[in-house]
Image (cartoon, rainbow, N blue to C red):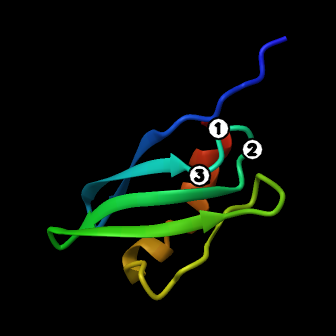
Amino acid sequence: MAIPVIKKFTFTAQVDETDVNFEMHPVNIREKQLYQVYTQYNNTPVRFHMQAADGLNFKITDRNTCPPAYIALEQQLSDAIGVN
C-alpha cells in the first residue's frame, strides 16, 4: 500500500470582492501539521504559517505577520488544507 504524499496546492478566496491566491506549502510531506502560506497583500509578498496538532483544525500561528483581512479567512484556509 502506497503512503500518501502531501503536496503543495493553491487556494483562492475572496477578500473585499477581490480574488486572492494562497500557495499552501506543507512542511511535512507525510502528515498535515504545518503549512507555509504565501500570498500577496497590497502588492507585497506575505508569508505566514498555519499549524494543527490534530491535522484538522489549522490556526494561523504568527498572527502579527498575517494581514488582518486574511486572519478572517482562517477557517476557510483550514478547510482547504483538510480537503487537499
Q: Earlier in the sequence, mark 2 or mark 1?
A: 2
Task: For marks 1 and 3, give the CA distance.
Answer: 17 Å
* Tag nearer the camera, 1 or 3: 3
Q: For the residue labelled by badge 1, is the local secondary structure a helix, a strand or a loop?
A: helix
Say above or below: 68 vs 8: below
- Indicate the amino acid at tag 2: Glu
- Residue 63: x and y in percent read 51, 83
Q: Are marks 2 and 3 in contact (CB under 8 Å)?
A: no
- Can you tell which of label 2 and label 1 is closer to the viewer? 2
Residue 66 is situated, as x and y percent measured from the top left of the image, at: 42, 78
Q: Vertically, is 65 above or below 73?
A: below
The quarter of the picture where the C terminus appears is: top right
Task: Please name the residue that numbered disc 1 is placed on.
Answer: 83
Could you tell me how far apart the alpha carbons at marks 2 and 3 are, in whole angstroms?
9 Å
Identify the residue at the far bottom of this view.
64
Label 2: element kind = loop
Sequence-first disc among 1 and 3: 3
Query: Is residue 41 left or right of 63 when viewed as pictured?
Result: left
Q: Secondary structure at mark 3?
A: loop
Label disc, if present, on residue 31 of the rendered structure? 2
Image location of residue 73, percent across then percent down:
49, 66
Q: Position of residue 13 (x, y in %)?
A: 39, 53
Could you tell me which residue is drawn at 49 percent across and 75 percent down? 71
Disc 2 + disc 1, Cβ < 8 Å: no
| Residue 24, placed above or below residue 52 | above
Find the distance from the CA under tag 2 to the CA under tag 1.
Answer: 13 Å
- The image shows residue 61, relative to residue 13, as above or below, that is below
Q: Residue at x 76, y 53 (%)?
A: 56
Three-letter amino acid code of the residue under disc 3: Val
Residue 6 image-quadrant placement: top right
Q: Which residue in the structure is indicated by mark 3?
A: 27
